[in-house]
Amino acid sequence: MSLFERLKQGLSKTQSSLVGRVDSLLRGRTEIDEELLEDLEEVLITADLGMKTTQHLIQALETRLAAGRLTDPEQVRELLKAELKKILALESRPVDFSSASPFVMMVVGVNGVGKTTTIGKLANQLSRAGHKVVLGAGDTFRAAAAEQLEVWGKRAGVEVIRHAEGADPAAVAFDAAKAAVARKADILLLDTAGRLHTKVNLMEELKKVRRVLDREISGAPHEILLVLDATTGQNALTQARMFHEAVGLGGIALTKLDGTAKGGIVVAIAAELNVPVRYVGIGEKLDDLRPFDADMFVSALFERS
């Protein structure tokens, strides 16, 4: 199965909740009017595209309608497709791992979103591409987080720097940075804690980790990647806002897209935070963490079966 086919399959639930409902609304229509646009607005909001994106799309349609350039349903579909591509392409670019050596990526996110698994998959892919990778087990509070990372490390053939459970995450960051420099690693991926119930403490801790990294490796972290669970919809947007305010995000990895109808949240996050979506997870396999491609994502959503 091609990558496009796999993405299309992974997005099938989102496709039904968004494009499927748009198509149902347009079916049999001979004219486009304000009433239709109102119904369309409701579909877009409930498909987790977010208020900002929805207003932008409806405004674009209203402008066309007023100018007499929106006369049939296919034009509505094509305009939505083009505008979504524009929004996502604006904030879609791959991580440039060659921009620093070692390149330090600090991975953040609340517990349960697939953070450690995402780091493991990324380490595997980067290692196979010929990069020397070191992992830092900075989530010292979650039971077995370091062990889980070590399993991934063995699988990817990369070294994992860890301390005992309950250790200071900043100390792990310090040792991981020292090890990455000493081993002449190309990339350091640092896992971090994700206990949201102590929000203020967590954010302060992440700021401390960031300061330690910068002290050891100039300009580090070069990327702060937030891992979000797509199945949480609007809650993912709230998390993204919170982490962005606290530590300033460089990009987002959206996991579990294949298990949700809320994939529209990709658009809401890109539009509202101006933070690029770097990776999307469309399955359990190692290769199912994919660099995000805006064109392919929108095309897969809109392609008719």
Image (tube, grey):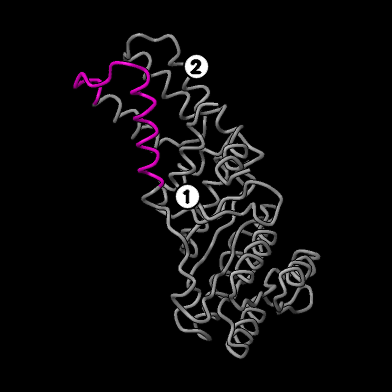
In the rendered image, residue 80 lying in the magenta stretch gets the answer yes
Q: Is residue 293 above or below residue 174?
A: above
Q: Which quadrant, please, contains the C terminus?
A: top right
In the image, residue 42 lies at what x, y percent? 46, 23
Residue 291 horizontal side relative to residue 90, left or right: right
Q: Quadrant of residue 180?
A: bottom right
Q: Residue at x 53, y 24 (%)?
A: 20
Q: Which residue is mark 1?
A: 293
Q: Residue at x 55, y 58 (%)?
A: 226
Q: Quadrant of residue 261?
A: top right
Q: Which residue is mark 2?
A: 24
Q: Residue at x 37, y 21 (%)?
A: 74
In the image, residue 187 lies at what x, y percent? 57, 76
Viewer-side label of 2, 1:
1
Q: Which quadrant, please, contains the N terminus?
A: top right
Cβ atoms at labels 2 and 1 below 8 Å apart: no
Q: Residues within 10 Å of mark 1 (few under 14, many from 20)?
A: some
Q: Quadrant of residue 69?
A: top left
Magenta residue span:
64-88
Which of the pair 139/287 is nearer the observer?
Answer: 287
Which of the pair 177/143 is nearer the observer?
Answer: 177
In the rendered image, residue 238 lying in the magenta stretch gets the answer no
Mark 1 residue type: Asp
Residue 276 horizontal side relative to residue 90, left or right: right
